Amino acid sequence: MKTRPAGIGSAHADWMGSLPPKLSAMPLKHLAVPGSHDSFTYWVDVHAPVGPDQKAYVKYLATMFSVLAKKVMVKWSMTQNLTFKEQLDAGIRYFDLRVSSKPGERGKEIYFIHGLFGHKVRDGLVEINTFLSGHKKEVVFLDFNHYYAMNADHHTHLINMLQEVFGSKLCNHGAVEGITLDYLWEKGYQVIVFYHHPSGKDNPIMWPGNKIPAPWANTTEPRKLIQFLDTTLKERAKQGSFHVSQAILTPRVNTVAKGLVWGLRNYLVERNLPTIMSWVEAQKPGVDGVNIITSDFVELTDFANIVIKLNNLLLSEQDSKPR
């Protein structure tokens, strides 16, 4: 019998709603929340042009060696294998979203992007909303942090789309300290959208990007990554915001050249997972601890489960306080 990878399944589809009252009353910025890096890259379109987020030399190579170059790009652009629903079922509650129009295409359609174009954004949002409608106590962070080939009309279209799809589930922008699960449940809020662009500035349901800093180590070396994660965590308390620890390694040009046929997962991620997961397992949420932790290929380990279980440390901490 073939077994499924550790991260696939619906064991954590309702983990937020199952938290004890002590934790649902805590600011959400103090809880440990699993997230995915480049969340939408489980499918990319090899027949579409290379995305506008790519450097000129990559676009040139893709033009010269079209199909071959794109097949290589797929191996290095894909950072997840699970669909949105599969990630949600597994417990993922933070989504790292990069979007773009297709240059030259008529209309205002917006697509997910990471080197190559992915699904239409609306389709992904509808999939998330369908899950949330069936799991009323689950809350997601949607972090729109990169935009390409988008003018003012595109941004208006995307913001309107978010309002149309999620409606009253969208949480109004407010003090981070006051955002607890209890508060969100009472209001019927299930979606917190972060919009890293001036277009969302005056909209009460678009949270500014500075409310969810996500420092990026930009390294291929696990040791440097761990050092960076520890350093940035020490600085988070003074920011008074949510916080994303990006437990990811980033390939450089020479990394891709050396591991051309293997791709990101086989060449960089799998071999370094034990070191990264050891760091995750050693963390503690709370005032000076981790909040959101993101990973590539969240199904390769029991990632979501490990992050969710960190919240038990908050219970034992409270139980040990003198009465």
Image (cartoon, rainbow, N blue to C red):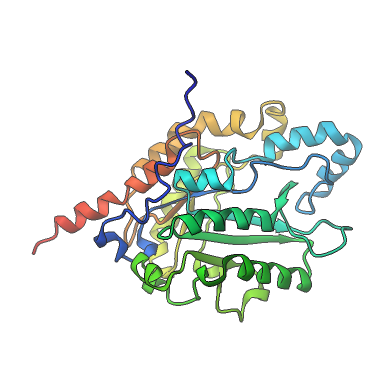
The residue that appears at 85% across and 57% down in the rendered structure is 103
Q: From the viewer's perspective, is residue 9 above or below residue 177?
A: above
Q: Residue furthest front?
A: 134
The residue that appears at 71% across and 39% down in the rendered structure is 253
> What is the x, y in percent for residue 304?
43, 43
Q: Residue furthest left?
A: 323
Total numbered badges shown on the rendered structure: 0
> What is the x, y in percent for residue 78?
65, 40
Query: Is 114 left or right of 307, judged from the image as shown?
Result: right
> What is the x, y in percent for residue 81?
59, 38
Please indicate, yes or no, whether residue 311 appears anywhere in the rendered image. Answer: yes
Please indicate, yes or no, whether residue 295 appears anywhere in the rendered image. Answer: no
Q: Which residue lies furthest to the top in this view?
A: 1
Query: Is 258 left or right of 310, judged from the image as shown?
Result: right
Q: In which quarter of the image is residue 250?
A: top right
Q: Residue furthest bottom?
A: 202
Between residue 44 and residue 221, name the one nearer to us: 44
> What is the x, y in percent for residue 239?
44, 69
Between residue 61 and residue 201, name the one nearer to us: 201
Q: In which quarter of the image is residue 265?
A: top right
The C terminus, quarter of image: bottom left
The residue that appears at 88% across and 43% down in the rendered structure is 60
The residue that appears at 83% across and 45% down in the rendered structure is 48
